[in-house]
Image (spheres, rainbow, N blue to C red):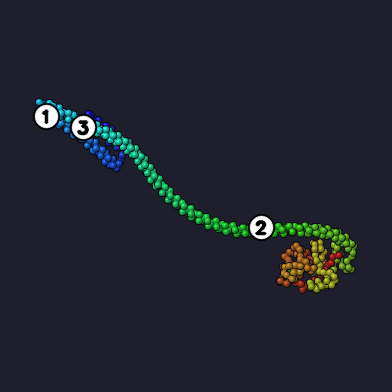
Amino acid sequence: MSVVFDRKAGEIGGDGWNLMDTQERSKCSGRSRGLVWYIGTAACLGLLYLLLLVVILSYVVNNDKATSPQGTDQLQFFTLGQTECENLTLQWIQLQKRYNKLSESTQQLQTMFSSKNAELDAIRDERDQLKMDTRNLTKEMENLTLQGIQLQKRYNKLSESTQQLQTMFSSKNAELDAIRDERDQLKMDTRNLTKEMELLQSRFNTVVTMRDELQEEVKRLNLNRTEKLCPDDWKKYNNKCYYVSAQRVSKSWDKSKKDCEDRGAHLAIINSRDEQDFVSKFYDRTWIGLSDKDLEGHWKWVDGTDLVGDGYWQEGEPNNDRNIEHCAEVSRKGGGWNDMPCSERLSWVCNLPL
Ligand code: BGC
Ligand code: CA
């Protein structure tokens, strides 16, 4: 009979043990203590059986010595001891089997424990990682929340701007529609005007042709007229007849004008430098048919037409001296026109186109 202790099964403090943390160790040490107690109990029981066997055997031997003459009793006792011993051996074997099973379970538990330990470590790592991830996610979430608030503000501003733009757009659209309508109307007007203009152009061309024809006719008639003579005592110069007032007779500008009109003419209207020289050569000072009586500075001929261009004023004239000069004279000495009080009595010249 032999008791074989499985060494590995007893190595509760192996590598797996060292891998555990204090808490796990305290948990497992409880389980291990139970296991050790169980093994110890089994070992004690075994020893007790052995001791009992030794006691029985020594008792048998001593009794045998004491009762050697009675060999049969001794044999019976020995047989009983042997049976007992065999029973004990059987029990020991069963105990050994149980121990072996227990060792296997312990090994399995150890393996499971190591595996669970590794799993626990992995889960712990995973948990730590998750914690870190959670922290990061929390920070990220906070950042995102801030960004979200900012984005919301921006969105609100953008919405306001969009609304304003929408309003402006609608207004501009209405404006555009109005302008478009106006443009269409203008296009239509332009088309009508173009047609009208074409019509007018055509009429204008006709009128121009007629004018040219008339001008030709006028030239022809003028040619005829140059053949004509001015009245007696009138002077002819460049297709115009001139009446020059008599010597030593002088009149105011209005009376001079009236005299010309009575003669079927008008106070001299001068259209060229030549004519100006012609009119000025008869007397020192001579009325011509130019005045600004209606409006100061607005010089008009007696036929109602405005003075065109600068005229032939003397240097520094017209000066409206003493604010009473509204009628124009020609001065032989001065070589040009001068404004004078209309009441002044001067010679005068009338003229009339032929
Ligand atoms: C002035 C003229 C003025 C005239 C009146 C002259 O001395 O130069 O401007 O019309 O006097 O008599
Ligand atoms: Ca003057």
Residue bearing the label numbered 2: 180
Please tell me which residue is depicted at 43% across the width and 49% down the height of the picture. 141
Q: Position of residue 314 (x, y in %)?
A: 75, 64
Relative vertical location of residue 137 with respect to residue 294 in this rendering, above or below: above
Residue bearing the label numbered 3: 88
Q: Secondary structure at mark 1?
A: helix
When asked about the image quadrant of residue 29, the answer is top left
When asked about the image quadrant of residue 58, the answer is top left
Quadrant containing the N terminus is: top left
Locate residue 96 relative to residue 153 in the image: left or right.
left
User: Label 3, label 1: how many angstroms apart (C-alpha)?
Assistant: 22 Å
Q: Position of residue 278 (x, y in %)?
A: 82, 64
Q: Secondary structure at mark 2?
A: helix
Dot 3 or dot 2: first in sequence order is 3
Q: Residues within 10 Å of mark 1 (few under 14, many from 20)?
A: some
Q: Which circle marks residue 23 in the picture?
A: none
Locate residue 211 relative to residue 91 in the image: left or right.
right
Q: Which circle marks residue 63 in the picture?
A: 1
Amino acid beneath label 3: Leu
User: Label 3, label 2: how many angstroms apart (C-alpha)?
Assistant: 123 Å
Q: Is label 2 in contact with label 1 (beta carbons under 8 Å)?
A: no
Camera-nearest residue between 296 and 129: 129
Dot 2 or dot 1: first in sequence order is 1
Camera-nearest residue between 230 and 73: 73
Q: Residues within 10 Å of mark 3 (few under 14, many from 20)?
A: some
Amino acid beneath label 1: Asn
